[in-house]
Image (cartoon, coloured by chain):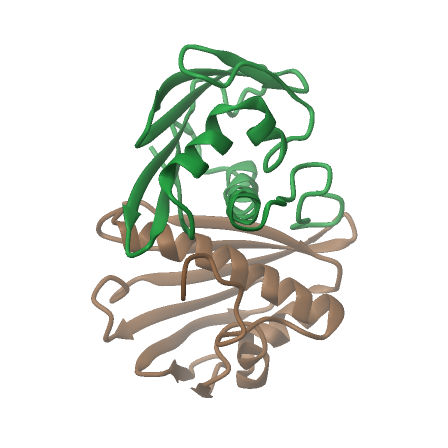
Chain colours: A brown, B green
Amino acid sequence: MPDILHRVGIAAEPDHVFKALTTIEGIRNWWYSETHGDAAKGGAFQFRRNRLEVICADPSLVMWRYSGPAEDWVGTEIRFRLEWRDGQTYVLFSHEGWRDPNEFMHHCSTKWATFLLSLKDLVEKGEGRPEPRDMKIAVGA
Amino acid sequence: MPDILHRVGIAAEPDHVFKALTTIEGIRNWWYSETHGDAAKGGAFQFRRNRLEVICADPSLVMWRYSGPAEDWVGTEIRFRLEWRDGQTYVLFSHEGWRDPNEFMHHCSTKWATFLLSLKDLVEKGEGRPEPRDMKIAVGA
């Protein structure tokens, strides 16, 4: 099955990145401004109607499982591995479990890159670009 | 085998995007400033020591094959499908033929996203961000 893969390097220690991935305030500042719920270990959160469960939140690995309602994403898992090396925290990202490399998957791959750069900016400079201020990759998207 | 997939939508007609993909001047302005050779159908071009052959350059599909020397890329193919829809040219991108989803592939996936956004900026606004002015995704990379 095809996966979306990315890597960014963030000039900050892993715990800063971890915090941005495991708190609602953090997620609101790099991914979706309108996120609600609990992003800590064992929690669940949502943006709009989309629901995610936190299936792992260890210092070097954060994993979410998407539970609905977008059909393409149901059952997929989003992973962030954090590795401190060469004075930066590498975020090894994957979005796994896609059933089909359809056009929406192409779109999501590019969009994830922009959100990971938003995460990098948030941690390094204190300001990310969460939706609706997200970097646009197409007309209106 | 895993592929890198992306999609951007560019607010311009396909021939403008096609030109940026099939001329050395175009490629220099969104990918690598130091590109040399011939990017038209049947041509070959290079940046630094990297060699690419143009294996297709039709109005709706441009394909390059990488011939060396970077081992991870040897034999891989880079495809740009151009589709005019909803007032924009969608670029459906893939970089196919990776033997292993290693960390360098994660890096390249994110980097391709930034270069496709550079292509979008070049065509829409007249100015891209080719290397060495490329968008950084890690410390010094």
Residue A102 in the image, given as x and y percentages of width and height: 25, 49
Q: Residue furthest right?
A: A87
Placement of the N terminus of chain A among the 4 image quadrants: top left
Residue B38 in the image, given as x and y percentages of width and height: 53, 14
Placement of the C terminus of chain A among the 4 image quadrants: bottom left
From this view, report whether residue A31 is shown above or below residue A4: below
Q: How many marks?
A: 0
Residue at 25%, 67% (x, y): give it.
A74
The image quadrant of residue B122 is top right
Name the side, left or right, on which A95 lies relative to A128.
left
Residue at 57%, 23% (x, y): give it.
B24
Name the side, left or right, on which A58 lies relative to A70.
right
From this view, report whether residue A75 is shown above or below residue B123: below
Nearer to the camera, B29 or A91: B29
The image quadrant of residue B45 is top right
The image quadrant of residue B118 is top right
Residue A97 appears in the rendering: no
Q: Residue furthest bottom?
A: A37
Residue A136 in the image, given as x and y percentages of width and height: 49, 62
Residue B133 appears in the rendering: yes
From this view, report whether residue A121 is shown above or below residue B14: below
Residue A93 in the image, given as x and y percentages of width and height: 50, 55
Nearer to the camera, A109 or A138: A138
Nearer to the camera, B126 or B5: B126
Residue at 53%, 64% (x, y): give it.
A135
